[in-house]
Amino acid sequence: MAPIQYIVEGGHRLSGSIEPAGNKNSALPIIAAALLTEHPVTLENVPRIRDTETLVELIRSVGASAEWTARNTLHIHAKSIRAADLDPELCVRIRASILLAGPLLARCGEVMLPPPGGDVIGRRRLDTHVLALEQLGAKVTATDRLEFRCPKLTGADVFLDEPSVTATENALVAAVAADGVTYLRNAASEPHVQDLANFLAALGARIEGIGTNTMVIHGPATLGAATYRIQPDHIEVGSLIGLAAVTRSPLRIVRAGVEHLRSIRMGFERLGIVCRVEGDDLIVPSNQTLKIQDDFGGHVPKLEDQPWPAFPADLMSIAIVTATQCEGVILMFEKMFESRMFFVDKLIGMGARIVLCDPHRAIIAGPSRLHGATLSSPDIRAGMAMLLAAVCAEGTSTINNADQIERGYERIDERLNALGAKIRRVPERKG
Ligand SMILES: CC(=O)N[C@H]1[C@@H](OP(=O)(O)OP(=O)(O)OC[C@H]2O[C@@H](n3ccc(=O)[nH]c3=O)[C@H](O)[C@@H]2O)O[C@H](CO)[C@@H](O)[C@@H]1O
Ligand SMILES: C=C(OP(=O)(O)O)C(=O)O
């Protein structure tokens, strides 16, 4: 497949309404969890992006039928499946291939998984997955692939060593099929973990504590069919808030899922960007102060990521680009991944004033006028952050490896062009 490039003419104001896609990180565990039931499942509002297309290929490879019945509607029927050896080339394309562990173990009693891929943003440990599934009775062997075996999953009092998002999801799915009650403690509670739990409940699972860090799962559940709508992507909403701010544009983000936006809005407020809620729409007015809010006593403020419900790691790159357009100084502290901040050298090359203190901390002094450059997208979020920088810069930028952006953002070039951006995709999109 030819690599994708975005050629971006910067400096244009945007305006209008845009609806976020369904949450990628909900869609992935939910597609995997659809393997848990023998009955048909219809998923609506599924983002049609590289990651979901790859996972669909993977679930077909174990015998499930999966058909797109509309652009964003996916019909899955896992009447009978097998724990086949999964294609290593497909597994390494996405982090979410690891999400097949829980459902396949539950349905087939074993699963052999080649290493997963995903964004190269630092070490991506699998220890929590292993720890959780072992506590539910699985025997795990790690060679060039991970092998999980367990003829009968059994409920347990599980304490995760860290609130890992995908490990929580694997453990939750396995616990639904396990015999007896499972306590899942120190669990992640991100909106996508909640979305997965609500999907499992729609299939017939009994789960208490959804949205908290302790879930209680009463297994084994008798699962049926379901039609389920994936929730809006709060990370895309955060990306759009940043986009509106750096281009000083008024945007209405419709059906934004405002119940999950508190920590995100609070993070942007620290940068002097205040949004308004109207029903389930989020309005980003153009007349922002874009003034970084000092801490009490005039101290340099800090924006840091943490597990939910705090400011999400996946929005740090967007927040960094946004801060380059705001007046003042701020410390950005990315605690969770150790390679996510390296892309700031590209922003420095575009004219941003940033000191990268170490792999986790960067000081940004704004505002600075950015100029167009040739960039390469290292991961989904840094890629989207570069797109924001390119859209607000003077002159033309070329973003190479835009494939990374399209792993996570559906038709983002077309959707931003509809608001007034000037992004040319090479090669042109077909269909
Ligand atoms: C497919 C999917 O859903 N991917 C998301 C998922 O990845 P994923 O599930 O792989 O990420 P994890 O939640 O396991 O961990 C992310 C990183 O944070 C670290 N960590 C985690 C918890 C903690 O309390 N302290 C800590 O330092 C981990 O060691 C790891 O380095 O969650 C990440 C964290 O929200 C997101 O960036 C990814 O987009
Ligand atoms: C890091 C991300 O994705 P993945 O975990 O699939 O690599 C992301 O969505 O920002």
Image (tube, grey):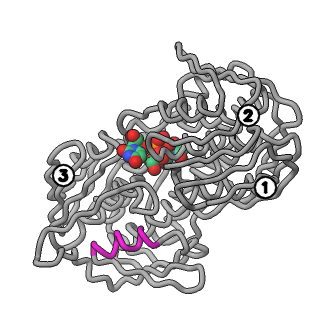
- The foreground one among 406 and 125 is 125
Residue stretch in magenta: 262-271
Q: Residues within 10 Å of mark 3 (few under 14, many from 20)?
A: some
Q: Is residue 9 above or below residue 78?
A: below
Q: Which mark is residue 348?
A: 3
Amino acid type shown at disc 2 = Ile
Q: Is the CB of mark 3 within 8 Å of ligand 2? A: no
Q: Which mark is residue 70?
A: 1
Q: Is residue 55 above or below residue 14?
A: above
Residue 57 percent location from the top left of the image: 70, 33
Magenta residues, dominant SS class:
helix
Q: How many marks do you count on the picture?
A: 3
Q: Is residue 195 left or right of residue 298?
A: right
Amino acid type shown at disc 1 = Ala
Q: Is residue 138 left or right of residue 364?
A: right
**Residue linked to disc 2:** 59
Q: Is residue 60 above or below residue 315?
A: above
